[in-house]
Image (spheres, rainbow, N blue to C red):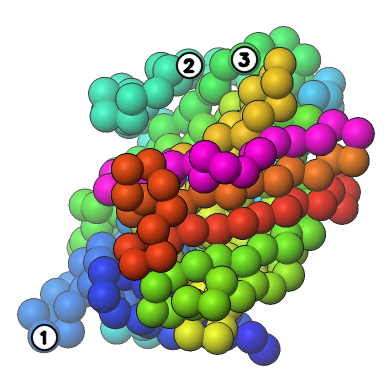
Amino acid sequence: MKKLAIILLSSIVLLNTSCLKDKGFDNFEYGTKDPALSSPPGVGFNLQGGANYVKNIGLDVTTSSQSISPSTVVVGYFFNSTFTAEDVHAKLSVDNTILTDYDATSGKDPLEVLDPSLYHIASTDINIVKGSQNATVSISVDSTTGLDPNKKYAIGLRIISASNGITIAKNMDKCLLILSIKNRFDGVYELTFSNFHPSLNPNYDGDVTEVELQTTGPNSCKIFWPLANLFANPALLNGGLQYFGSQEPEYTIDPVTNKVTVQNAFVGATTFYAMNPTFDSHYDPATKILEAKWGYRYVGGQFDPTTSREWTQSFKYIGPR
């Protein structure tokens, strides 16, 4: 099994992808439990890969009902990475004030509340059975033929109660589902890439891995890396496949010119990207290949080998996801 690493600030944390633990929680980036402080056990949405409560979902255009992947919305029990000693019950509620709060800080077009008649939550009463740590929330969406492909729809969910006096983690109590019609770029891709880092990959080496481009808008997609099981951008650092935390590259394709731009869509991002000005970042509709070259810490808008971080990427379409 290959190992990945997430780079947060100046440290490198190894992540074995066969493990189901959430590093962000275990490292106390979010959640309720710090053993040194004897915090109580808690429940919250299992935010794999960081304290990002936003989940982007692409929907097929169909008259039939379609299920949102069970792994998308997960309620977890958190206490020293132990399993529950008894059944833990939690109750969810639809809370669309989460959309309002997101709109106020996202800097993007406002979301539209998805008509409640178009979706079904199997149950808002969630049971994490004894001896486990997680429970999935089953949600299905009815016919999408009436949805506007130029809009983003959303459902806000909040945990409002938990059994046996268990604490609700206040920074894990909400989940925002952003739904949009899958665009023509959505799918599974073979990604051939190389990347540069002044100390961790000064030779600009690269690798090949399978990724997904998941719809975030009519002409934009975020990169999802199945090997890491989260929205993350593959990099070769210190000779191994790794990724940087708090970075979720979003690729936008101009519908007229097919030019590609890349930006960090991570909620609360502090790192922002620039396109390499000498490279033709574009999408080829005939071959379904997307080429991009971008990075950050450029100097005067130009790549600088003393400070810059940069990726050169070629996405080759394999099929639908």
- Give the position of the N terminus as an image quadrant: bottom right
| Marks 3 and 2, how far apart at CA | 11 Å
User: Dot 3: within a 10 Å radius of its alpha carbon, few (fewer than 14), some, or many (20 or more) residues?
Assistant: few
Query: Could you tell which of marks 3 and 2 lies nearer the N-terminus?
Result: 2
Considering depth in this image, is 281 or 49 the residue closer to the camera? 281
Which residue in the protein does label 3 denote? 150
Q: Amino acid at mark 1?
A: Ala
Which residue in the protein does label 2 denote? 112
Number of labels in the image equals 3
Q: Amino acid at mark 3?
A: Asn
- Which of the two discs, 1 and 3, sits closer to the camera? 3
| Residue 170 point in image, percent of width and height | 21, 52
- Which of the two discs, 3 and 2, sits closer to the camera? 3
- At x 58% / y 49%, what residue is drawn? 293
Which of the 4 image quarters holds residue 105?
A: top left
Secondary structure of the residue carrying tag 1 is helix
Which of the 4 image quarters holds residue 66?
A: top right
* Residue placed furthest toward the left: 37
Q: Amino acid at mark 2?
A: Glu
User: Dot 1: within a 10 Å radius of its alpha carbon, few (fewer than 14), some, or many (20 or more) residues?
Assistant: few
Task: Name the dominant secondary structure of the magenta segment.
Answer: loop
Which residue in the protein does label 1 denote? 36
